[in-house]
Amino acid sequence: MKPAIIIKVYDRCQHLKQCLESLERCKDAESFHVIVGSDAALKKEHEERISVVRRYLKHKEGAHGFKKLSVLCHNDNLGEKGNGGACHLYAKSSGHESFILMEDDVVVGLYFLKFMSESLAAYSDQPDLIAVNGYLDHDLTNAPKKPFLYNRFSAYGYGSWYAKWDLVQKKRDSINYSTRILLDFTRFRKVAKFSPNAKSYPFLAENFYRAGDIETGLMMEFENLWVLKPPLSLTANRGMDGSGLRSGVNASLQAMVASDDPIDIPSSSELESVRFETVKPRIDIKYILENWLSFLIYNYFPFGFSVLLKLRSLKKSL
């Protein structure tokens, strides 16, 4: 059976429309079961936008290009994790052993589904491979020219096997890897050069908020796990327009275009393993300084996390 395609949506109808239409363009789209989880309003002022989303989905159920389109409309607000969990349970109950997860703001290229489904079929028995990513980070200019193993995770359209992914989630939820890296000076020093997200580790360590892609990447760092990456990005993010909860605005990411080129799937013996520090360029000195400031305040200042919270609030107010 083909993997289920799961899409989580809240109140962004135009983003969802672009996502579904890009999936319908894909080769072999008519062979896939799409499951859309529509979360209920957290605030009253969101209700009208969610009604627009649900009217669109009701229309789409009667006219789509997939094998099947299932819409789960939740009566209560479940949050992102709860919405995704409900969709996964529905996929499993429908007999799916693997999945492709999409946020509503992701658009895909013509061969995205072919690459994802063929990769999930080909590499299911590789124990240290936990997922297949459709997105290639825009700054990995020295990455291999064919699919490769990479030790960092991206959430912009990814797939996995339930037998593996459920174990990954259980491990990630039982160990706070953000805390571990904040206690490991050598590892943090390496990561701080390449990741603008390192400044967020204290907030993840204190469970102030969750960021599954960052936390999964840290788990991969400590557990020596891998994802499969394409040589060209088969997805692009359209949510870097300020419409998301934490995405903000990023003009360069917003301008990305998903590749329509086909990609051959190599055998497992041909896959090259690439660590992020060998292909990712160093970030701007501004972000490196922010990473270290966050690290030093959290670890060495009295009531360091409270200081970071105040700095975060001050930055948001400017």
Image (cartoon, rainbow, N blue to C red):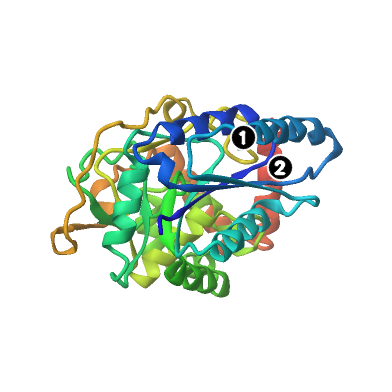
Q: Earlier in the sequence, mark 2 or mark 1?
A: 1
Mark 2 neighbour class, 10 Å CA radius: few under 14, some 14 to 19, many 20 or more = few
- C-alpha span from label 2 to label 1: 46 Å
Label 2, on which residue? 313
| Image coordinates for residue 35, horizontal then vertical, percent | 57, 49
Q: Amino acid at mark 1?
A: Gly
Q: Nearer the viewer, residue 164 or 251?
A: 164
- With 87 as the anchor, is 24 left or right in this view? left
Label 1, on which residue? 62
Mark 2 or mark 1: which is in front? 1
| Image coordinates for residue 255, horizontal then vertical, percent | 42, 24
Residue at 43% from the left image edge and 41% from the top image edge: 30
Q: Nearer the viewer, residue 250 or 15?
A: 15
Label count reads 2
Mark 1 neighbour class, 10 Å CA radius: few under 14, some 14 to 19, many 20 or more = few
- Image quadrant of residue 262? top left
Question: SS class of the residue under badge 1?
Answer: loop
Look at the picture and state if 11 lies above or below 207. above
